[in-house]
């Protein structure tokens, strides 16, 4: 089986490449937008340099590929959607037999979160393409959220505009394992929710953080406009300020309050809890 993985130079895509390469029965094509240092990957891994914005290069990279693991692009939402459209078109042109696509729990064109809208539209593109597919709808990553938790560790306060929203934070490694499992299986034609083992509010997340890191951390719900003003004052790029504020709007709507057993069913092991990940990174 020949499996291509996009975003292979990133933390998630790179982990998927290594998981697949460790199997020994898979030829992996690591698709990257830039060349990677020699020795980055071991085993049966071929590196294909192809930017998401270059359809001819994408088609060449997917030639002879049985399965594509579509790890999301990044940047402004319109750009990401264009990149995903290029990948879907390239997969169809190359007659790829299965696309295992990264998506999100809140994949919905009605969501206030810009990337959830992109994920919803990407799923629609794949379903309309006729290419057999499976979707790993991931919750918010623990590692991503840890940036705010690290700040809170220093100040003692987790100041975010999340109200009483609950989130089932998931470890990036569990998402990678789920994608790798989908990639070597038959297309399911449906989505699989890859969540953490529990859904908790921000006050609960603060409490778990305080216990794991043995330091006081308390959650303070702040208005959305206060968050935007404070983040802007740090020099945050306007795009990411919009992206983060729209994400917290979706959290306030309880769009990430979901716990499913799909991760364990796909990977054969339960997902890591927030406390476990934080304890490993004291």
Image: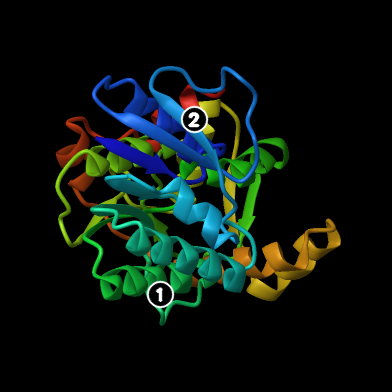
Mark 1 Cα-neighbour bin, 10 Å: few <14, some 14–19, many ≥20: some
Tell which of 276 and 97 is nearer to you. 97
Secondary element at image label 1: helix
* Residue at point 53%, 58% (across, down): 56
Is residue 163 at all visible to an observer of this figure? no
Is any part of residue 265 visible from this angle? yes
Please state the horizontal and vertical placement of residue 278, each as a whole percent of the image.
49, 30
Q: Nearer the viewer, residue 202 or 119?
A: 119
Disc sitting over residue 278 in the figure = 2
Q: Nearer the viewer, residue 215 or 121?
A: 121
What x and y, as percent, mark residue 157?
A: 65, 47
Q: Residue at x 40, y 18 (%)?
A: 43
Horizontally, is 88 left or right of 49 in the view? left
Density class for disc 2 (Cα within 10 Å; few <14, some 14-19, many ≥20) is some
Q: CA distance from mark 2 to mark 1?
A: 33 Å
Dot 1 corresponds to which residue? Answer: 121
The C terminus, quarter of image: top right
Residue 188: x %, y % from top left: 15, 55
Residue 67 position within the rendered picture, expressed as x and y whole percent measured from the top left: 29, 46
């Amino acid at each position: 089986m020949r499996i291509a993985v996009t975003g292979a130079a990133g933390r998630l895509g790179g982990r998927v490449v290594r998981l697949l390469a460790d199997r020994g029965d898979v030829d992996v094509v690591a698709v990257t937008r830039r060349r990677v240092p020699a020795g980055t990957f071991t085993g049966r891994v071929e590196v294909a340099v192809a930017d998401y914005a270059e359809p001819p290069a994408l088609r060449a990279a997917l030639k002879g590929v049985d399965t594509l693991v579509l790890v999301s692009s990044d940047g402004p939402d319109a750009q990401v959607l264009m990149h995903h459209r290029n990948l879907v078109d390239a997969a169809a042109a190359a007659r790829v037999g299965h696309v295992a696509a990264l998506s999100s729990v809140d994949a919905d064109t009605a969501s206030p979160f810009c990337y959830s809208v992109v994920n919803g539209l990407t799923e629609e593109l794949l379903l309309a393409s006729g290419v057999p597919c499976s979707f790993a709808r991931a919750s918010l990553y623990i590692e991503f959220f840890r940036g705010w938790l690290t700040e809170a560790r220093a100040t003692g306060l987790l100041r975010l505009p999340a109200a009483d929203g609950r989130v089932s934070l998931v470890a990036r490694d569990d998402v990678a394992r789920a994608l790798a499992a989908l990639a070597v299986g038959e297309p399911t034609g449906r989505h699989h929710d890859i969540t953490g083992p529990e859904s908790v509010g921000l006050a609960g997340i603060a409490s778990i953080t305080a216990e794991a890191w043995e330091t006081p951390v308390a959650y303070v719900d702040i208005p959305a406009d206060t968050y935007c003003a404070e983040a802007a004052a740090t020099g945050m790029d306007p795009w990411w300020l919009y992206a983060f504020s729209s994400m917290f709007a979706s959290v306030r709507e309880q769009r990430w309050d979901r716990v499913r057993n799909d991760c364990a069913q796909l990977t054969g092991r339960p997902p890591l809890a927030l406390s476990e990940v934080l304890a490993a990174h004291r």
